[in-house]
Image: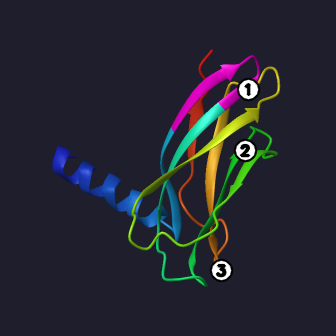
Amino acid sequence: MSKAILMALLLGAQAALAGEADVVDVKVRRSSAGTYDFDITVRSVDKGWDHYADAFEVLGPDGKVLGRRILLHPHETEQPFTRDLYGVRIPAGVTRVTVRARHKPKGYDGATLSVTLPR
């Protein structure tokens, strides 16, 4: 298979996973033992107060919510946008988390990102 065809297939697959609110980047820093700070970038289809990315969450490997930030307004003119979430307590032994974004009214339908926690 040619490189061009492979790239087209990969880009098409990525677009197929896109939703109303996609996590497109995550930066994570250890702030203290067992506590992490996140900078999360979301691309969303915001169209006013009834149709916008209204939250994101950090999930453990078991799907348990470890941290959540509620977003209080649409970001129609700021796409993608980055917001922080500080002081997320991560249980001992967890080395990787997943971040997802919620869109009002669609819910959690977008792309997620998994990241390895720094030591």
In the displayed structure image, the side of residue 101 where residue 35 appears, left or right? right
- Residue 68 vs residue 64, the one in the foreground: 68
Vertical side of 29 occupied by 1: above or below: below
Say which amino acid is labelled 2: Leu
What's the CA distance linking mark 3 and mark 2? 21 Å
Q: Position of residue 66 (x, y in %)?
A: 78, 42
Decide if residue 92 is in sight here.
yes
**Element carrying mark 3:** loop
Location of mark 2 (residue): 59
**Element carrying mark 2:** strand
Q: Residue at x 82, y 21 (%)?
A: 92
How many tags in the picture?
A: 3
Which label is found at residue 105? 3
**Element carrying mark 1:** strand
Residue 13, picture quadrant: bottom left
Q: Are marks 1 and 2 in contact (CB under 8 Å)?
A: no
Q: Main secondary structure of the magenta part?
A: strand
Q: Tell me where the magenta segment starts and ends, as one range.
A: 27-36
Identify the mark nearer the N-term, 1 or 2: 1
Identify the mark nearer the N-term, 1 or 3: 1
Say which amino acid is labelled 1: Thr
Q: Position of residue 19 (x, y in %)?
A: 51, 68
Location of mark 1 (residue): 35
